[in-house]
Amino acid sequence: VAGPKRPQDRVNLPELGSVFRSLLQKPVTDGGYGKTNGELGKRHPVNLNGTPPTQGEMAASTDTMDQGIDPGDERNKVEMVSNRPTPDSVAEIDAKPGDTFARGQSQIGHGSVLIAAITSCTNTSNPSVMLAAGLLAKKAVERGLTIDPAVKTSLAPGSRVVSDYLQKTGLQKYLDQLGFNVVGYGCTTCIGNSGPLHPKIEKAISEFDLVAASVLSGNRNFEARVHQNIKANFLMSPPLVVAFALAGRVDLDLSKEPMGRGSDGEEIYLRDLWPTLQEIRDTMQSALTPEVFRRLYRDFAAQNPKWNEIPSSTGEIYEWDEKSDYIHQPPFFENFSMEVGKIEEIRDARPLGIFGDSVTTDHISPAGAIKPSSPAGQYLKSRGIEPADFNSYGSRRGNDLVMTRGTFANVRIKNLMVPGTEGGVTIHQPDGEQMSIYDAAVKYQADAVPLVILAGHEYGTGSSRDWAAKGTRLLGVKAVVAASFERIHRSNLVGMGVLPLQFADGTSAQTLGLDGSETYSVTGLSDAIQPGQTVTLEIARKNGKRESVPVKLRIDTPIEIDYYRHGGILPFVLRELMARN
């Protein structure tokens, strides 16, 4: 498995329990969760009876109620599909029964599995592991195992072929009995479209500061990506997702410890349920034929009539709709001219944020749910949009007014300028006022103050999310100074006209003792710069002391110098096209 915060942090299955317990007690500054030994085994009762929440529970629920979901509603729609629609047809959704939330009594604590998702990306294109999940579910049901109602389960097949062979082999009914119903086809839990948890669960998470877990078969588990309130997220194969959902916790060794007791009272271990390779092969032979693919995709363009009915403009020039809150004309070509700018030094910039290592593009530009209290949420409310209709940052990526407000808005990002806090906040200088990163950027832009970002190693790792660079540019950031960069994000920064600079080995914001009260200038910049040359970062401290630090220009190629001189790749390309005509 991999996790709990990065996909590259692999953990051997027998060691998962001990690794998780170790991380629980490790200091937050060292990548842990900062819990005491006495907290580890505590469990807190939760009554998931489906009744409407009290006002206190509504206030405590930081994700569910933000989405406008009433947990007391009897719904005739699968919850996740109605929250993030990806159906075959509206009629098909309406035909599916079910409550918004499971009901029953539960106990949760650190390490409790609260989300278990077989997701559409990566693994659902592999029939062997999907059939293994179904076979494991079959054996679990036959032995009388059930999944705790606190665990939110879902299955999002990568294609209709997966649904076809799970139905044909008779395995889908066992997955259904455990709660792994098909919720739709497309991006779900692994991109943050998990939907809400029961508000009573979220209240317990908030009240007791629980480090709850998700298990999913996706390929990314960066902080707050899967769900804003789930702090530990583990990537694993589909059959292991089912297994950990049955176990209900990650702080155990499934190779030695029982997953639960069957209907006969006997302890059941993972080895009792794990399918053999021969069982998987035999099932695959009867499950897959080329005809299935031909039948399901012969008329794929007609399978989503609602999508096909959406009116669209015609012609070569896009018609912007000022009323649209999904697609908005961005400002990248405002004040455009054919005159190419000059590369100039950056003077007296203020830091918008100082970050540590492994700041991902999910930290910089989250794709999940939009909180009503966030700058993006406040903006959407000002447009008359109810929280239930906010949708996600990913769905609003065509609207720069939303995405700029969402830049550095991840609820788990840690700005070292504001120690001990999480979320998109900073300190505005020189007045020292704490505010959202977006609001601070607006104030700085009003005063014509350039901005910089300081960071540690692996800045921009993760998804190659273009808005992580676009949003940075639109906030007014002129340069990012980091110990190292992820390759694609570095390139994207240059492409948006933001200067990437790299500290020398052994130098960082921490070794320099920077706290965000300084001003920064980058000298040595001119039209004569060369890829990879050394320039100077001049630091002016609040006490009047000044310091010069050599930094490497991470414009790596001659063409990137041209992009930067033009203010980014967009004006560069437009000038090239217009010059030809």
Image: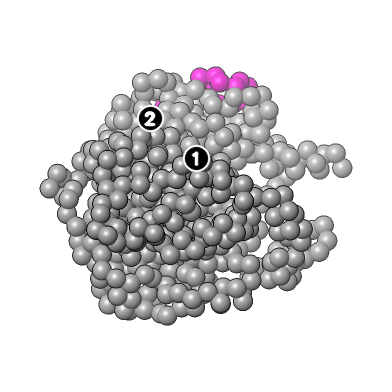
Give the image location of residue 273, x and y in percent: 38, 48
Residue 580 seen in the current view: yes
Image colouring: one colour
* Residue drawn at 51 percent across, 19 percent down: 534
* Residue drawn at 44 percent across, 48 percent down: 239
- Badge 2, how many Cα within 10 Å: few under 14, some, many 20+? many
* Distance in Å between CA atoms under marks 2 and 1: 62 Å
Q: Mark 2 highlights which residue? A: 539
Picture quadrant where residue 569 is located: top right
**Highlighted range, magenta:** 524-541
Q: Do the residues labelled 2 and 1 touch (CB within 8 Å)?
A: no
Relative depth, front residue between 580 and 309:
309
Q: Mark 1 highlights which residue? A: 277
The amino acid pointed to by label 2 is: Ile
Q: Quick check: is 208 in the magenta stretch?
A: no
The amino acid pointed to by label 1 is: Leu
